[in-house]
Image (cartoon, grey):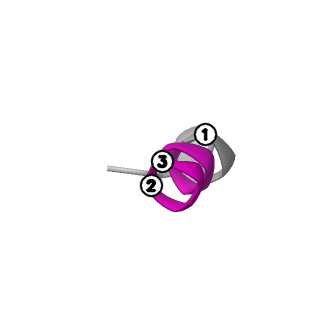
Amino acid sequence: MMRRRQIRTARRKFSGG
């Protein structure tokens, strides 16, 4: 769950793959 610090890391892992 991307809350505040995982908002960028999550986007890179999900979007960047």
Label 2 or label 1, whichever comes before in sequence order: 1
Q: Which residue is mark 3?
A: 17
Residue 11, position as x, y percentages in the image: 58, 56
Q: Quick check: marks 2 and 3 in contact, CB under 8 Å?
A: yes
Amino acid type shown at disc 2:
Phe
What is the number of the mark on residue 1?
none
- CA gap between label 3 and label 1 equals 11 Å
Q: Which residue is mark 1?
A: 9
The residue shown at (68%, 49%) is 8
Q: Compare residues 14 and 4 and report the one nearer the observer.
A: 14
Q: Quick check: marks 3 and 1 in contact, CB under 8 Å?
A: no
The residue shown at (48%, 47%) is 17
Region in magenta: 10-17
Amino acid type shown at disc 3:
Gly
Please rate how many residues cluster around mark 3, counting C-alpha atoms within 10 Å: few if below 14, some from 14 to 19, many from 20. few
Q: Which residue is mark 2?
A: 14
Q: Secondary structure at mark 2?
A: helix
Q: Secondary structure at mark 3?
A: loop
Residue 7, compared with residue 6, is above or below; it is below
Q: Secondary structure at mark 1?
A: helix
Q: Nearer the viewer, mark 3 or mark 1?
A: 3
- CA gap between label 2 and label 3 equals 5 Å
Q: Which residue lies most toward the left here?
A: 1
The residue shown at (50%, 43%) is 13
Left or right relative to 5: residue 1: left
Q: Nearer the viewer, mark 2 or mark 1?
A: 2
Please rate how many residues cluster around mark 2, counting C-alpha atoms within 10 Å: few if below 14, some from 14 to 19, many from 20. few
Residue 9, position as x, y percentages in the image: 60, 39
Residue 15, position as x, y percentages in the image: 54, 61
Amino acid type shown at disc 1:
Thr
